[in-house]
């Protein structure tokens, strides 16, 4: 797929930014967590830092300690990608590409080497809040939800605008697609379902009583969370409300789904776990952060939280134990995405971070020590 994309690039199609290694910086990794005052000092001096703090806990009945770094891959390398000139609000990983969008009203496209190989140079009319990649053959259709109340559709090779979907009367906070629908949600309290072939708005869902702030869409089920503190599960085919999940005491700010499990987060830093096929109450909850959780990512038996407290945390799904804390951003962390090789985060400090996992060989060596 990457080969197809690069072969399709033509001179003049996009603002090509070759050899941008001057804007991709290697970041020194520290051994201990730093305080907020120390973070302010780093920011004031313009110095980059990263902390990979893997947590140890007691072993049942022995009085000894087990080290989480024996079962959690260490962070081997950290890179700071700096191309935005305003807070970065959303990120997306797709194949060998990383996309970032922010309050500078632009989309940047990054290679895994850290080079920015292009950007949508025509400014949008508002901050970029959400992105989704289409399922077309070459994966070149990019869907963007933004502050200007529109869903815009772009060719991410030529960077040409294909279509603007108009209808929302508030900021578009999330967008998702499959081979049938484009789904968007907004601060205007609605969820819109669009036909992906002709861009017609098929239906408007009005299940929330406040701004819709987050969405997860899988297997023809729309899951949304809002300022009304509720999570709704809806059918895109007919707009039917399938289920309402109630338990959060503050606005729901993030939601993800993996198989039958739903994980949600709120403004107070709470995490709640739900069964997609169970009842309307959470099966488990935990105070994960002291401040608002802005984004979630889930991968296998682990999930990650990104918070306004400038921290990224890794959690075990089964035990809800925090096994890792990552530091490095000097402002609110607004987005997190996870792959088998790396973690990607973005922040209001205008940067994107790539956290590369160590190799399996390194993990085996640590277990021998």
Image (cartoon, rainbow, N blue to C red):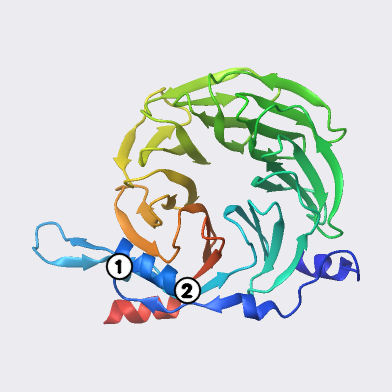
Which mark, by number, is residue 46?
2
Mark toward the viewer: 2 or 1? 2
Q: Is residue 5 left or right of residue 252?
A: right
| Picture coordinates of residue 133, whole percent (x, y) | 72, 49
Whether residue 299 appears in this view of the structure is: no
Residue 103 lies, with reference to residue 111, above or below; the image says above
Q: Is residue 232 above or below residue 141?
A: above
Q: Nearer the viewer, residue 174 or 282?
A: 174
For the N terminus, which image quadrant?
bottom right
Residue 167 lies left or right of residue 351; in this view the side is right
Q: Nearer the viewer, residue 221 or 247?
A: 247
Read off the residue under disc 1. Answer: 33
The quarter of the picture where residue 67 lies is bottom left
Give above or below for 317 relative to 59. above
> Between marks 2 and 1, how big is the CA–CA gap?
18 Å
In the rendered structure, which disc, 2 or 1, sits on the residue that comes first in sequence? 1
Dot 2 alpha-carbon crowd within 10 angstroms: few under 14, some 14 to 19, many 20 or more: few
């Amino acid at each position: 797929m990457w080969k197809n994309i690069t072969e399709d690039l033509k001179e003049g199609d996009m603002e090509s930014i070759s050899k941008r290694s001057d804007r991709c910086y290697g970041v020194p990794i520290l051994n201990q967590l730093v305080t907020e005052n120390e973070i302010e000092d780093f920011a004031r001096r313009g110095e980059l830092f990263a902390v990979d703090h893997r947590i140890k806990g007691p072993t049942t009945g022995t009085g000894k300690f087990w080290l989480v770094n024996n079962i959690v891959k260490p962070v081997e390398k950290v890179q700071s990608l700096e191309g935005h000139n305003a807070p970065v609000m959303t990120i997306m990983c797709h194949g060998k590409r990383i996309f970032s969008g922010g309050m500078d009203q632009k989309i940047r496209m990054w290679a895994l080497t850290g080079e920015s190989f292009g950007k949508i140079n025509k400014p949008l009319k508002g901050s970029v809040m959400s992105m989704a990649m289409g399922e077309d053959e070459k994966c070149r259709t990019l869907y963007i939800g933004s502050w200007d109340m529109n869903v815009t559709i772009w060719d991410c090779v030529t960077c040409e605008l294909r279509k603007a979907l108009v209808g929302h009367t508030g900021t578009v906070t999330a967008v998702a697609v499959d081979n049938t629908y484009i789904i968007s949600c907004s601060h205007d309290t609605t969820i819109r379902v669009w036909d992906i072939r002709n861009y017609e708005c098929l239906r408007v869902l009005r299940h929330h009583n406040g701004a819709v702030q987050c969405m997860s869409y899988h297997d023809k089920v729309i899951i949304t969370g809002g300022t009304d503190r509720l999570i709704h599960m809806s059918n895109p085919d007919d707009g039917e409300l399938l289920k309402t999940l109630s338990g959060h005491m503050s606005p729901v700010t993030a939601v993800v789904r993996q198989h039958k499990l739903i994980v949600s987060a709120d403004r107070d830093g709470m995490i709640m776990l739900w069964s997609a096929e169970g009842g309307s109450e959470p099966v488990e909850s935990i105070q994960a952060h002291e401040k608002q959780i802005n984004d979630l990512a889930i991968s296998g038996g682990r999930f990650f939280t990104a918070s306004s407290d400038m921290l990224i945390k890794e959690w075990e799904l089964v035990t809800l134990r925090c096994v890792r804390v990552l530091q490095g951003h000097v402002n609110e962390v607004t987005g997190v995405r996870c792959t088998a090789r790396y973690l990607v985060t973005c922040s209001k400090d205008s940067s994107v971070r790539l956290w590369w996992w160590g190799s399996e060989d390194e993990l085996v060596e640590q277990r021998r020590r």
